[in-house]
Image (cartoon, rainbow, N blue to C red):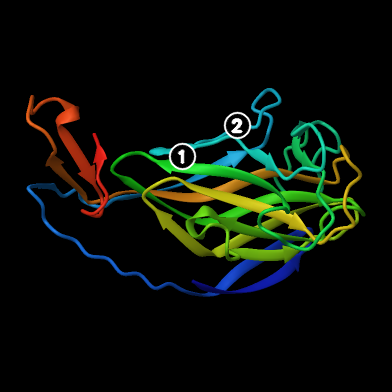
Amino acid sequence: MVNLFVSQKEGKKFVTKTIFQKKFRLSKVFLNLLTLLTVNSADAQIAKWDFDDGKETAFPSQNVNHVSTSKLLQGNNNGMTTLISSTSPSSGYTGSSGNYNASAAALFAGFEKATSTYFEFTLTPEQGYSLTINAINFGSKSTGAGPKAYSIRSSADLYNSDIVTNSFPLDSKWYFYENKGWSISNSSSVTFRIYGYNGAGAGQNTAVWRIDDLSLNVTASQVQTFYRSHQNGNWAAPSTWEYSTDNVSWNTS
């Protein structure tokens, strides 16, 4: 996949758009024993984390139908810092929820997918559904020792390529970042990471990077599903059947 980005500041909001995206896909479909074709339908929704929900929490405050959404996690943190914190509540941009936010002690270094500090979450569609995500938006604050840049990547390509990149002002102020104009679709779990890097680096156990009001544009779509029996037995029992969305990889019902 090849992406080109353009970013511009609108007040206290940064908008980053993917202006070019090229994908190469090869798909093939075969009929096998018993095939069930489900008519495609799409349901566009928004998943959110404001880290409040009436209490301190890393779980989403708003979920998406037909998609399981994980709590937010912290990776490659410099020492031990509390993930959800009431220090430096978000402010200054439209929709800032204040109260709690997610924090990290970002490491000093250029970008490296295996070692750079990140926040991550995972989306898992229900059986018979695929998901498409086309925007990841969030508020962020970076101190003078915090990361100067961020990169959003996904497990779809093992975090090998940028979906979106942008820079952070190191002024300890909150800004809102809109990252849209791209899309990733998957019929299985996909994990997204927001990496922060290129900063002076935090002292151990010191939070220098915070995010809040994380939101995603997600579409859940019913997909074509194939079924076949894989053993003799009770035809009404789920264990008798396997299902596949590509007629190649099969799973037990």
The mark that comes first in sequence, 1 or 2, is 2
Amino acid bearing label 1: Val
Instruction: Tell me, for residue 59, which label it has, or none.
Output: 2
Q: Secondary structure at mark 2?
A: loop
Cα distance between the residues tagged 1 and 2: 13 Å
Q: Secondary structure at mark 1?
A: loop
Across and down, in percent, residue 111 comes to 73, 62
- Name the residue located 62 percent from the left edge and 45 percent from the top edge: 120
- Within the image, what quadrant is residue 74 found in? top right
Vertical placement of residue 149 versus 80, above or below? below
Q: Which of the two marks, 1 or 2, is nearer to us in this view? A: 2
Point out the image quarter for the C terminus: top left
Judging by the rendered image, the residue that carries numbered circle 1 is: 64
Vertical placement of residue 56 versus 204, above or below? above
Relative to residue 85, is residue 144 drawn left or right? right
> Badge 2, how many Cα within 10 Å: few under 14, some, many 20+?
some
Whether residue 182 is visible: yes
